[in-house]
Amino acid sequence: MKKNAIKWSTIVRVLLVVLLISLVVMPTWFSWAFQPFAPEKGPIIYERASLLSLSLSHLGLVALASIVATLVAVSLAILVTRPLGTAFLPLSRTITNMGQTFPPVAVLALAVPALGFGTGPTLVALFLYGLLPIFENAITGFSTLPPATMEAARGLGLSRWQRLIRVEIPLALPVILTGVRLSVVIALGTATIGSTVAAKTLGEVIIAGLLTNNTAYVLQGGLIVGLFAVLIYDALVQLEGLLLARYSISND
Amino acid sequence: MIPARAGTFGLSAPGVLLALFGFASLLAPFMTLAANRIVEGKGLTAWQLAGPEVIYPGLLSIIIGLILGLFSSWPRVRLAGAVLGLAGLFWLLSQSAPQLLQGAGEYARVSPGLGFWCLLAVLILLMADALTQLSPRPMTRLGLLLTIVTVLFILLGSGALSDLSIMKEYASRQGAFYNAALRHLGLAFGSLAAATVIGIPLGILCYHHAGLRRIALPILSFLQTIPSLAMFGIMIPLLGWIASTVPAAKAIGIAGVGFAPAFLALLLYSLLPVVANMVSGLQSAPESVRDAARGMGMTLMQRLFRVELPLGLPVILAGLRIALVQNIGLAVIAGLIGGGGFGTFVFQGLNQTATDLILLGALPTVALALTAAIVMDVLVEVTQPSQSAQHTQGMPRKPS
């Protein structure tokens, strides 16, 4: 029963990946499917920019923002969970709680008056907003380490630095990764809206469809973005599971 | 739990950081003066704004406020400092705007600049930090929130800020603003209500049937993952098709664009936090309590209503909080598909590159989301059993 379920999900995954790649690389294959949604005699497949280049730029934006956000957020979380930084712990909790109440769209809209239009403000908004879930999870990870393990690490005579690298970071990693996953999913969605402020992302296809009443564009853009998000989310969940399994085996 | 504040001479480390940042912000342009609503304005620092009778009281209260925020052992003084600083900030804003507009031309606009926004953020954080130290009871927090909201409404209603560009944008579309506000609230609360009506029974079913739980929760998580713009977009052909094939659906106002697709998209997004927290809330009753209930001969329904639901209430409410805050933010996207709400102004403003129109949409959304979060947090805390049981907050928020 269990084995069967795994097989099915693998087949579905492969099919979705193939569908996504062909949607991006060979959009004309799907003309027949989008035809009914296009206006009469109107264009069916988005051709103002190649879907491949839009996808790459979209994913690149998300990857860049998420990598920088992860590095900064984890470093900050390490700082505020050291004895020297504890004074800042309540304030940083307040900032993350309040910050995550800010709607991502609003963050994006507010970045425009400050930074102007284009890819820049989107990148900054993605980075700033992406910090919060990673930071929150990293703080949780670093402040809920099992006391017995920490005591043992100290007893072994490991220095602070060694404890951080060899014990604390590996132990907190699963929780941090959950934050990274959340942050990546948020960034994928916010980057889509980024095309309203002239960032080059897949949202452009959806917006073009909305502006010209061409539902075929809307569906095309929506399907591609949705598939990317679902598959990336799934991949990150699998990665977390893999790391967790590996860690708990080596721990036994 | 508040760790003891380290720091020499009773100085609060966050207070020092905030004060430094606050003083630096004083050097940035406090306001901008532009020839009209579209062009970029000229930045003016705080001491270039108006005559000394305006500047000195304002600057002085900001500086004193920031200094009062330094003393870690007197949280009440820190709170008072934050309030004093905020008063100075709004004094400068309201008093200098009319002076700046004098002789600047018919279409001239004044707006708060980078310095103002940074100082506002610094002072709000100082206030929040002092409040965290004081850790007020839930009802006190609610009272504080009510006071702040009242003061804000008095400030906006008094006309003291009506010379600001954002208030001029508001004045020229008052009717549209109230419609947008009603529509935004309708979308956010309406879809939450619908999600509650569907999600609570679904959550109870998932709690009792592990098989259903294993199917429903992953599907809802995947739905949550889909970027909002894509989700709103996909709803359009879907609902358009329903409207064209089912006459009854069309008769009750279901159409491809407008309210219906936005409502449905928000409903789908809010199902995950509602259902997932419903399940973990019901599961949070300790096994011993459930055994006792069973031993007392309670039926399934009695156990649900007398034991599991009351004990799980905080977690269930936390789910509603996540859904509500998320809905308020996501309802902005409705502005792109003709669904109304504050998003209309945001996207109009982006199209016209009119900064203050963007703010007219974005600021009320942020204020609404923050208010909803604070009120729901109080509700969650009030329903918490007194033995200070720590519950996890459950599901994460939905992205954008």
Image (cartoon, coloured by chain):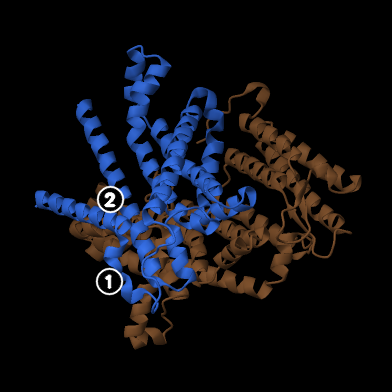
| Few, some or many residues within 10 Å of mark 2 (<14, 14–19, 20+) | some
Give the vertical position of A51 relative to B52 (above or below).
below
B365 or B245, which lies in front?
A: B245
Residue B6, compared with residue B265, is above or below; it is above
Q: Which mark is residue B289?
A: 2
Q: Find residue A244 and name its label.
A: none
Work out how far the residue at label 2 is from the one at label 1, CA to CA, in angstroms: 60 Å
Q: Is residue B278 left or right of residue B127?
A: left
Indicate the quadrant containing the C terminus of chain B: top left, top right, bottom left or bottom right: bottom left
The quarter of the displayed image where residue A219 is located: bottom left
- Chain A shown in which color? blue
Residue B384 pos. (x, y %): 43, 51
Residue B73 sits in quarter: top right
Q: Quadrant of residue B269?
A: bottom left
A11, A165: nearer the viewer = A11
Left or right of B131? Residue B88 is right
Q: Is residue B281 visible?
A: no
**Residue B68: image x %, image y %?**
73, 35
Question: Given the image, on which type of amino acid does mark 1 rest?
Answer: Trp
Amino acid at dot 2:
Val
Q: Which chain is brown?
A: B
Is residue B330 in sight in this rendering? yes
Residue visible at 60% across and 62% down in the picture: B361
Residue B59 image offset from top left, x and y in percent: 81, 41
